[in-house]
């Protein structure tokens, strides 16, 4: 008996012995006695709803299996996200099954929390409200996250019952500067949507539209509609910012400007445009005023104040003059609100000059976030509570103690003995911890509601599953507590239906059912009464722009706090998927770092991982530094969202909160906050923190991994069409019989009957957002290992986004999704002694879990390093096991795993095709990563079908295989990223 046979037999025998020794049956069958009418055991039911992880309002479809939601996907019919979903939307599922979710109301007595029933909590709130309202008006105040019209109206009606003013809607990112600029230029503080997809030139001054700006999934789709390759052409994107966000990393050209210098560049461009004959459609007084104001902004002055090279400014000016459909976007995170408003005013004027009809603005379909209160109004709200006789404060899904720099002051206000504070939340966050009563409510996936993500889009919410707790919806609670026996409707579901009826969107029960099934009303055509227009006289610009040319010297470091793609404002920090998914640029997970330019690192003698103490006039912060070239040398950057002192096991004490360094004061003109502060002291502590980063190397070391091509040559035949044996002249070999050549191959091809599954990844469309990674977590029951195991190199992600830097210019970045390549000559298959890696007849490299004995030979032999070994049985505290996909095996310690192309979805496709007596159609099977991608960078299909999309894309001149010269014949084909030089080579207009 040889060694391989012995190991195979012993592996099978150990499994049999282990199975025979258990006292319980390996499998159990369960029957639902009173199953819903629409439920078939083993078959999913889908419920259309609306994502509420941010104010964008994307449509979602919730997949329910046997009474529990196991997966969220984008609603293809929804006009905002069109079927895609970001990583935060994917992770919304974890809110339901979070092990730290509160089950019952908690009442604080003598500093201790005591559980009470929901009936007792309702009685207590009713009594407190009645006593407060009897004392006089405005004794009850309510602050909430941004909600839909139905819930907002109910808030107002309930507060009227209690003789109090309406609610304040609070969002940490309320875009005050953009609203103030539009109010000045157009007459209303509106947030229109933008037809980014219609532009041929996009210029951004910080708006992180791929991360947190307005509606990221919507704008990611629109961005690639203008920036992806079409008929050998693509739009141009230029970013001018002090730091390289994920959005700026996707620009064709990134200009690093001095923090606060963005406005100077904008007004310099306005001066150039007017000097070159643009802006004649402006009213004469406005044109004369703009000319006078912009006169000092010569190119030399712009260069002095902004720090960008003169050739870059000239290129930008020429590009704007040459573009047929330019669109300029305004400020983004990391700025003080005063400078941001100056930038946004300049951007609005520049768009008016370049496009007098504002054809790429959509004022009739505005974003919901525009109804959020200014930060100054939120601050005034809490100061009113402190100074006026308020007895009852209601907080709905907000955490101002964490998200406001003035958190310490808020703690004093809401801790006042005469104030009774009720926090409607499902988690013990920093604000709830300081409340008197915590009242858990239904989550968006458990409740009825309506939410208008945009003016012409009303999304609906419905219970996608029965609640795991007895918590009511906040609407039902208010109907009981505010109206008592005089409720206008039986429940909040009826209230929502009534509101939609009042708005003439739902006329009868059939309309209601149709609306709920669709996930909303998407064909609203009524026009807003608002119509933008410039005033006839001069604009009040002098007061706003008086300090625009102030000295912005580089003396002392500037600290910038920026929003998080993963955690938004911190509300997502209690979800393990979002902690485990690395930041797309630093590739650090579970931790917070301060990004510092290499020149600054060298000047201070810092090394990556050194713990530095940063101090401003408002606070102190200690955090490790991260060496990163994508920053202006005089600035340091830290991402917000972590640093919670409570908020559950996945958030508590993870990372640091940069808001502790920021000024608590709001801008007197815009009412917005400042996310920029000058540091008063920086001190090295002599400590070092090991960073949980997954990049390994920032360079490809000359290997053909993430490849690029020039726009001028992308249509030419690739060197991979050659017949050499080297890295750069090895031919592209499809994983089908036609891809085998007797001159290259020793072994015969695999016979594939009807199907050979594979994928095409277009690097020119991948923006590195990581939505595919989290979708894979959700679909395939991937274990979350935590910070300690990440540091040990034991991450479990089946799909990772690799980030590589150009060695000639470290500011140029390319992203590459890497998953199992399902090679036809798979190196893992030939080394396993028990044949756990199995090559199916359809080309899938299956992993047979109950064969695996954990030798890890397959991982050692895989050149793509995509196999993951379960070193431990990963922690799944209750009720997280209910979140698991029943179609996917949960792996245990000692087992190797990796991407399966979502084999369970392929099997479902087979079943459907078999029942209908046909072959699987092209595009019918959509793996989780493909489904969620907002830019359609991933395509899945059958290489045996010569008419399939993957087969056609494999013939693209940009097609190549990562490390293809190893002759593994990967079934994942990549299309090179198309690089274009943003330099202007035409004749200046």
Image (tube, helix red, strand yellow):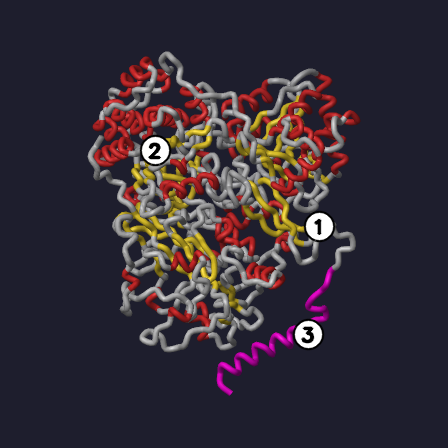
Position of 33 relative to 917 (above/below): above
Question: First in sequence: mark 1 or mark 3?
Answer: 3
Position of 652 relative to 501 (above/below): below
At mark 3, the secondary structure is helix
Rendered residue at 22%/30% (across/down): 989
Residue 63's x, y, as percent? 62, 50
Label 2 Cα crowd, 10 Å radius (few <14 / some 14-19 / many 20+) = some
Q: Main secondary structure of the magenta part?
A: helix
- Tell me where residue 157 sits by quadrant: top right
Question: First in sequence: mark 3 or mark 2?
Answer: 3
At mark 1, the secondary structure is loop
Which circle marks residue 21 in the picture? 3
Label 1 Cα crowd, 10 Å radius (few <14 / some 14-19 / many 20+) = few
Looking at the image, residue 710 sits to the left or right of residue 336; the answer is left
**Inter-mark Cα distance, 1 to 3:** 40 Å
Query: Which residues make up the magenta segment?
Result: 1-30
Task: Say if residue 929 shows up in the picture.
Answer: yes
């Amino acid at each position: 008996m040889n060694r391989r046979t012995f190991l195979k037999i012993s592996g099978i025998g150990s499994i049999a012995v282990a199975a025979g020794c258990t006292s319980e049956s390996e499998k159990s069958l369960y029957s639902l006695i009173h199953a819903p009418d629409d439920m078939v055991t083993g078959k999913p039911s889908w419920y259309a709803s609306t994502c509420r992880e941010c104010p964008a309002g994307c449509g979602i479809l919730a997949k329910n299996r046997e009474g529990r939601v196991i997966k969220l996907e984008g609603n293809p019919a929804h006009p905002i996200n069109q079927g895609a979903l970001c990583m935060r939307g994917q992770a919304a599922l974890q809110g339901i099954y979070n092990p730290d979710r509160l089950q019952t109301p908690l009442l604080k007595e003598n500093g201790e929390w005591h559980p009470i029933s929901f009936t007792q909590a309702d009685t207590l709130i009713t009594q407190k409200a009645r006593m407060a309202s009897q004392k006089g008006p405005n004794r009850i105040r309510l602050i909430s996250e941004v909600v839909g019209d139905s819930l907002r109206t109910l808030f107002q009606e309930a507060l009227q019952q209690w003789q109090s003013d309406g609610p304040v809607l609070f969002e940490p990112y309320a875009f005050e500067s953009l609203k103030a600029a539009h109010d000045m230029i157009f007459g209303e503080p509106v947030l229109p949507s933008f037809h980014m997809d219609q532009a041929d030139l996009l210029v951004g001054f910080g708006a992180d539209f791929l991360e947190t700006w307005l509606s990221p999934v919507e704008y990611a789709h629109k961005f690639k509609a203008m920036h992806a390759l079409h008929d050998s052409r693509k739009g141009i994107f230029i970013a001018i910012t002090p730091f390289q966000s994920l959005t700026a990393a996707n620009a064709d050209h990134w200009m690093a400007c001095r923090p606060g210098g963005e406005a100077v560049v904008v007004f310099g461009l306005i001066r150039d445009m007017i000097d070159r004959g643009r802006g004649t459609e402006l009213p004469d007084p406005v044109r004369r005023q703009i000319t006078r104001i912009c006169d000092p902004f010569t190119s030399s002055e712009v260069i002095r104040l902004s720090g960008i090279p003169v050739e870059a400014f000239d290129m930008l000016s020429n590009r704007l003059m040459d573009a047929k459909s330019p669109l300029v976007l305004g400020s983004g995170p990391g700025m003080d609100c005063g400078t941001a408003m100056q930038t946004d005013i300049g951007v609005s004027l520049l768009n008016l000059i370049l496009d007098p009809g504002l054809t790429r603005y959509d004022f009739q379909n505005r974003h919901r976030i525009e109804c959020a209160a200014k930060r100054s109004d939120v601050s005034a709200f809490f100061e009113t509570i402190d100074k006026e006789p308020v007895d009852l404060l209601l907080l709905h899904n907000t955490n101002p103690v964490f998200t406001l720099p003035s958190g310490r002051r808020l703690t004093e206000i809401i801790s006042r003995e005469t104030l009774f504070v009720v926090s409607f939340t499902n988690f013990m966050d920093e604000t709830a911890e300081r409340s008197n009563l915590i009242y858990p409510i239904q989550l968006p996936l458990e409740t009825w509601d309506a939410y208008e993500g945009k003016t012409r889009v009303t999304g609906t919410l419905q219970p996608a599953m029965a609640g795991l707790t007895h918590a009511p919806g906040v609407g039902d609670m208010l109907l009981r507590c505010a109206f008592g026996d005089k409720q206008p409707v039986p429940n909040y579901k009826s209230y929502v239906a009534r509101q939609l009826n009042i708005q003439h969107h739902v006329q009868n029960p059939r309309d209601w059912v149709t609306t709920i099934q669709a996930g909303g009303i998407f064909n609203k055509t009524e026009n807003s009464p608002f119509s933008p227009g410039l005033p006839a006289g001069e604009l009040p610009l002098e007061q706003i722009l008086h300090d625009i040319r102030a000295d912005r010297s580089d003396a002392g470091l500037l600290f910038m706090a920026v929003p998080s793609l993963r955690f938004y404002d911190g509300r997502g920090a209690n979800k393990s998927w979002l902690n485990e998914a690395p930041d797309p640029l630093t590739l650090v997970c579970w931790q917070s770092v301060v990004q510092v330019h290499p020149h600054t690192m060298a000047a201070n003698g810092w090394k990556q991982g050194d713990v530095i103490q940063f101090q401003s006039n408002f606070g102190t912060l200690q955090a490790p530094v991260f060496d990163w070239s994508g920053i202006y040398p005089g600035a340091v950057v830290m991402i917000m969202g972590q640093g919670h002192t409570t908020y559950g096991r996945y958030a508590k004490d993870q990372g640091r909160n940069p808001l502790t360094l920021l000024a608590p004061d709001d801008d007197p003109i815009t009412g917005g906050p400042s996310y920029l502060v000058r540091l008063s002291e920086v001190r090295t502590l002599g400590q070092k923190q090991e960073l949980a980063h997954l990049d390994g190397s920032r360079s490809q070391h000359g290997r053909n991994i993430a490849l690029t091509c020039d726009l001028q040559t992308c249509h030419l035949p690739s060197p991979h069409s050659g017949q050499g044996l080297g890295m750069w002249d090895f031919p592209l070999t499809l994983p089908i019989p036609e891809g085998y050549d007797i001159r290259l191959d020793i072994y015969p091809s695999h016979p594939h009957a009807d199907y050979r599954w594979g994928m095409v990844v277009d690097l020119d469309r991948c923006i590195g957002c990581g939505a595919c990674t989290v979708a894979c977590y959700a679909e395939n029951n991937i274990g979350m290992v935590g910070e300690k195991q990440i540091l040990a190199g034991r991450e479990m992600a089946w799909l990772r986004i690799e980030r590589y830097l150009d060695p000639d210019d470290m500011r140029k970045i390319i992203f590459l999704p890497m998953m199992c390549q399902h090679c036809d000559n798979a190196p893992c298959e030939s080394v396993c002694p028990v044949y756990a890696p199995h090559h199916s007849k359809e080309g899938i490299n299956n992993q047979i879990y109950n064969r695996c004995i954990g030798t890890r030979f397959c991982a050692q032999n895989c050149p793509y390093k995509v196999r993951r070994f379960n070193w431990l049985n990963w922690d799944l505290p209750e009720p997280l096991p209910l979140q698991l996909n029943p179609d996917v095996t949960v792996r245990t310690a000692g087992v190797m795993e990796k991407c399966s192309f979502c084999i369970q979805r392929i099997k479902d496709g087979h079943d459907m095709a078999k029942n209908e007596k046909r072959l699987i159609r092209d595009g019918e099977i959509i793996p989780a990563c493909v489904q969620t991608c907002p830019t359609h960078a991933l395509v899945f299909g059958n290489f045996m079908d010569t008419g399939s999309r993957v087969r056609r894309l494999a013939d693209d001149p940009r097609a190549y295989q990562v490390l293809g010269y190893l002759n593994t014949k990967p079934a994942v084909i990549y299309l090179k990223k198309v690089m274009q030089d943003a330099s202007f080579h035409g004749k200046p207009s």
